[in-house]
Image (spheres, rainbow, N blue to C red):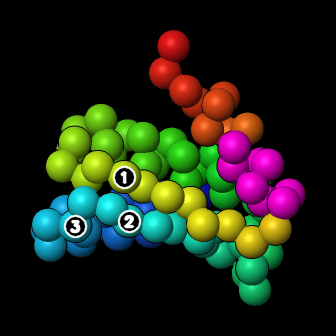
Amino acid sequence: PALLASCYRRSLEVALANGVKTIAFPAISCGVYRYPIPEAAAIAVKSVREFLEKHQEIERVRFVLFGAEAHRIFEEELERQEPK
């Protein structure tokens, strides 16, 4: 989990350093490496949310997903981690 989280954080750090306002992510490691999508979604959403809490310069983050199941899982995770 820590390595996957660092992929998202480091990508966001590079985007920030280069003045990027919008970034898109796939479900990293869920293809060939077969990382479980529910666990990957939880890590991805948490990592991105934590980064954006400190760095509002990035205006938009998109998760670009393959298939309805991955989309549903990420959507549910986004709702689950929605700040109350």
> CA separation, marks 1 and 3?
10 Å
Any mark on residue 60, and which? 1
Q: Residue 4: tell me if it is visible.
A: no
How far across and how far down the image is residue 71, in percent? Answer: 75, 55
Helix, strand or loop at label 3? It is loop
Examine the image and state in which quarter residue 15 appears: bottom left
| Residue position marked by numbered label 2 in the rendering | 23
**Quadrant location of residue 27?**
bottom right
Q: Is residue 74 above or below residue 14?
A: above
Of the numbered discs 2 and 1, the one sitting upstream in the chain is 2
The span picked out in magenta is 68-75
The answer to whether residue 43 of the structure is visible from this angle is yes
Q: Give x and y (percent) for residue 42.
A: 64, 45
SS at circle 1:
strand
For the residues labelled 2 and 1, the Cα–Cα distance comes to 6 Å
- Is residue 44 inside the magenta stretch? no
- Give the structural element (helix, strand or loop) at label 2: strand
